[in-house]
Amino acid sequence: MTTPQPTLPPALNFIAGRWQDDPQAARLPVHDPATAQPLGDIPLSGAASVEAAVQAARTAFRDPAWRGLPPIARERLLHRLADLIDAHAAELAAIEALDNGKPIAFASTVDLPLAAMWVRYMAGWPSKLHGRCIAPALQPAGSHHAYTLRQPVGVVAAIVPWNFPLVLALWKIAPALAAGCTVVLKPAEQTPYSAIRLAQLIEQAGFPPGVFNLLLGDGTTGQALATHPGVAKISFTGSTATGQRLVAAVARPLTRLTLELGGKSPTLILPDADLSVAIPGAAQAVFFNSGQVCFAGTRLYVPRPLLDPVLDGIAQVIDAFPIGAGSDPATRLGPVVSARQLDHVLGRIEAGRAAGARCVLGGHRIDRPGYFVAPTVLLTEDRHNPAVRDEIFGPVLTVTPYDDPEALVELANDSDYGLAAHVYTRDLGRAHQLAQQLEAGTVWVNTQLTPDPAIPFGGLKQSGWGRENGEEVFAHYTETRSVIIKTA
Ligand code: ADP
């Protein structure tokens, strides 16, 4: 059984409030990951479209129709958008399941509620963003009046990946609009359709033309957008390699940049953990969304005496996951997103095995059309094994037994990445200690994968720069301006 196939919106750019093609652009096919069949194609938008989108966003940024709005009116527009996302949730979830391959069961209960709630949370902020009055330290009391303003930075280039196409686009669009910025969104070339539908809803919500613009294309389009001098701020989520390329690209214009990049997050089961919580938690932390989650718990550390029960428990959890097309409501584990990702994941499994990891579950492509990888567990005690070190971004877990709990922090921190960590223990004192010692932007204790719009999120080391969400995100979308007035 499958849900009815949604009608996909036309693959057009949305620039200055108008839907337009890029007639000069080459076209790139978009595939259904569950069948490998084409769903349609998108323009690889070129320089003229990038120019038009950035200019539209610049014009809208200066236009009193947006700049002059009372903050409460920006709130109302965002609430209207959240209402529209809710009203079209079933359709958007079906698009997400078809385009990305993720199970509709999760698209409709995780992605879509989160998408709307992110917008609602951010809708509360426009009227609460303000500067401060500051007494100058060096001037006689009462002789000067000094204060700060929080000004929106300008045009935001939001460049997003394919694993949570709608949610991650809104992680950027909602706070940028709340701050009073204008936006050019470049969705991932593998998963453009929910962003196109979102752009239609943003138009319907009544945002002034040019406040939000959509540019379809691949990395070349993304690079042209990111390096455009009219862009004030780049908010990027994607691979560490692309993040590094962006850092090099903005060295000259010094464009503000936040980077939410890769991860290789550890899951630590402590000897006192409640295994009835830890085992399903550890499995969910890596297999949810077929492991295509930047903060997935991909390295599991288990006390040696608990290794067999934990491996058995994970095998049982995996056995209970129906594998299939995202559009099948029974599916809990879908395909990976693309043929390229399939090759990458299988190649990384092979590299791990070749370096000595023992495959205790899965380890192969599933024999059916589409890009399906069997949930895989690799057992290794070698911290240098490539499966332990490299981000795989697929349903692949490495398991390492340990003897000395005191050595755990060093083991967990031995990674180029620092996005998240998951800890299972009944000892809350130890949990608080670990929360300080683990090199991770988020530490989950006795739970996993629960991002929240109120809670800052981001990484250390090669996992990125800056924090999204919560009040902290506005540090990226606003600029502090100081005003000093001599009064006497
Ligand atoms: P992946 O390798 O998993 O596809 P990427 O980091 O390449 O991840 O892609 C994430 C997003 O970044 C996508 O929207 C993609 O088109 C875009 N992108 C890729 N390369 C560049 C680049 N050099 N500059 C800007 N954006 C890019």
Image (cartoon, rainbow, N blue to C red):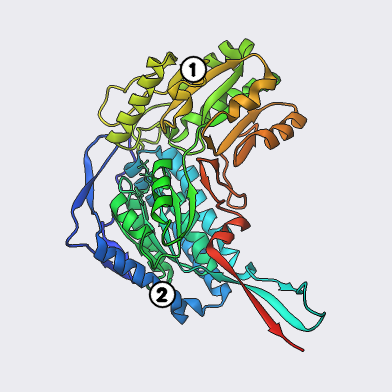
| Vertical relation: 302 (above or below) 187 | above
Relative to residue 61, is residue 137 drawn left or right? right
Q: Position of residue 74 (x, y in %)?
A: 52, 71
Mark 1 is surrounded, within 10 Å at the Cα level, by few (under 14), some (14 to 19) or many (20 or more) other residues, namely some
**Mark in the foreground, 2 or 1:** 2
Depth order, front residue of 255/195:
255
Relative to residue 101, is residue 247 drawn left or right? right
The residue labelled by disc 2 is 60
Q: Ligand 1: does it lie within 8 Å of the C-beta at label 1?
A: no
Depth order, front residue of 344/360:
344
Q: Which mark is residue 32?
A: none
Q: CA distance from mark 2 to mark 1?
A: 54 Å
Depth order, front residue of 446/146:
146
| Vertical relation: 219 (above or below) 281 | below
**Quarter of the image with the C terminus in it:** bottom right
Q: Position of residue 448 (x, y in %)?
A: 58, 35
Mark 2 is surrounded, within 10 Å at the Cα level, by few (under 14), some (14 to 19) or many (20 or more) other residues, namely many
Task: Report the residue at 55% width, 18% height from top.
Answer: 400
Q: Secondary structure at mark 1?
A: helix
For badge 1, the amino acid type reads Ala
Q: Report whether residue 448 is seen.
A: no
Task: Report the residue at 50% width, 60% height from top.
Answer: 174
**Quarter of the image with the N terminus in it:** top left
Residue 355: quarter of image: top left
Q: Ligand 1: does it lie within 8 Å of the C-beta at label 2?
A: no
Depth order, front residue of 146/218:
146
Residues under numbered marks 2 and 1 in contact, where contact means CB atoms less than 8 Å apart: no
| Vertical relation: 106 (above or below) 381 | below
Of label 2 and label 1, which has the lower sequence position? 2
The residue labelled by disc 1 is 315
